[in-house]
Image (spheres, helix red, strand yellow):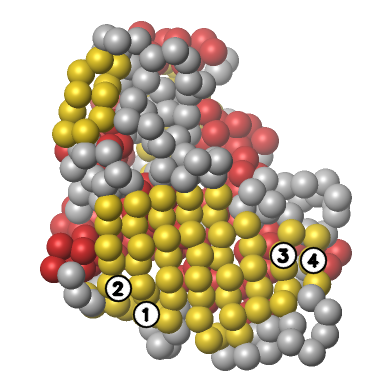
Amino acid sequence: MATAAIIGTGFIAPVHLEALRRLGIPVRGVLGSSLEKSQTAAQRWHLEQAYHSLKELLADPLVDVVHITSPNRFHYEHVCRALEAGKHVICEKPLAMNSQQSGELVRRAQSSGKVCAVCYNIRFYPLCLEVRERIRSGQLGRVFHVVGSYQQDWLLYPTDFNWRVLASEGGPVRAVGDIGTHWLDLVSFLLGQEVVSVCAELHTVWPSRKRLRGAIETFQTKFQISADYEELTIDTEDYGAILLRFAHGTPGVLVVSQVTAGAKNRVRWEIAGERMALAWDSERPNELWLGQRDAANQLLLRDPALLNPAARLYTDYPGGHNEGFPDTFKQLFRAIYAAIQRGHSPPDSYPTFADGHREILLCEAILQSHQERRWVDVKTDVHS
């Protein structure tokens, strides 16, 4: 069985760890941004190794797979070095800071012969997999249009700050890149159609934000704000509205916001077809709404006995026993590690580096559309 190591100690790193342990995949150690962080995380998570450096981690002969959960600006370097060391790679999104870097990583992944994946985990909600199969089988008929949103509220106040709000740290688009790409990857996956053109408007609600002097963890509980802060100019968006055109001509609309009060982590989509409509909300992930014109609307509760075989494969609990966000990582890693064990990747089993590259090309088209105030075609050469 392949053994993993994790780079990063922030919010998402223990999510990876927990999912791997639930699958019985051994995790050897962790690398933080300092030796102290590595040691603290290793002790807290009961891991054998607290690595001193990336070089030490990559030289460990017992590590087969590297999970990269470090800040965005480090992804390109970490992926390159992991592939050079002969490791399989599972990288948090975004794959890199720009399409030049991500295109290079696609080429390196292909020549490496290793399994290389990006963590677009939302694909692995069982009801999303169910919808993909229903659309594939023609149950909806022709898809007329799709609308949806990804909304959060953790950056609602000007005193909310995280490295992601700075383009130099997270990339030139933030709400779109951080959460919007999850929606775009998911809906493209459901429809079996890539986005080919966009018309976008982005907006920065807080042109400046107050950063507390000292580290702040993502999604931490908010306490009384100290007066000890510095004010920084913000060069990324809090909100975006995007018109979409998919490959088969299907139109769509996406709203992305990290300043919507009460929306903690809400992914929503509605797909209108000629025979029925379907809708789903990640804050109620075990319910699928089925809309009909000439019959009563229905609500399908997630139950493996009622799902297609492809969705049932990634559904572990009986109906009435809910599956949510942590389970999506478990099922994503199940697909990836199965490919590692087989030595090859079957089509559509998990998001690859090519998928991660497409999302960066899409982000760049969205930013260009906003800046030039016009429709922009998305580059289609995933090797560019």
In the image, taking residue 309 as reference, residue 27 lies left or right, namely left
- Looking at the image, tell me whether mark 2 or mark 3 is earlier in sequence order: 2
Q: Which residue is depicted at the point 64% across and 68% down?
A: 279
Sequence-first tag of 1 and 4 = 1
130 vs 251: above or below: above
Give the amino acid type for the residue marked by disc 2 in the picture. Val
* First along the sequence among labels 2 and 4: 2
Residue depicted at 30% across the width and 44% down the height: 205
The residue indicated by pointer 2 is 198
Which numbered dot is residue 288?
A: 3
Label 4 sits on a secondary structure element that is strand
Is the C-beta separation of discs 1 and 4 under 8 Å?
Answer: no
Q: Earlier in the sequence, mark 3 or mark 1?
A: 1
Q: Earlier in the sequence, mark 2 or mark 1?
A: 2
Asked whether 140 or 263 is in front, the reply is 263
Alpha carbon distance from label 2 to label 4:
32 Å
Residue 65 can be seen, yes or no: no
Q: Are marks 3 and 4 in contact (CB under 8 Å)?
A: yes
Amino acid at dot 4: Leu
The residues bearing labels 2 and 1 have C-alpha atoms spaced at a distance of 6 Å
> Which residue matches tag 4?
300
149 up-or-down from 36: above or below? below
Asked if disc 2 and disc 1 are in contact, CB closer than 8 Å, the reply is yes
- Label 1, on which residue? 245
What is the spatial separation of the Cα atoms under label 3 and label 1, in whole angstroms? 24 Å
Q: Using the image as rendered, state which of residue 283 and residue 187 is in the foreground.
A: 283
Circle 3: element type: strand
Image quadrant where one finds the N terminus: top right
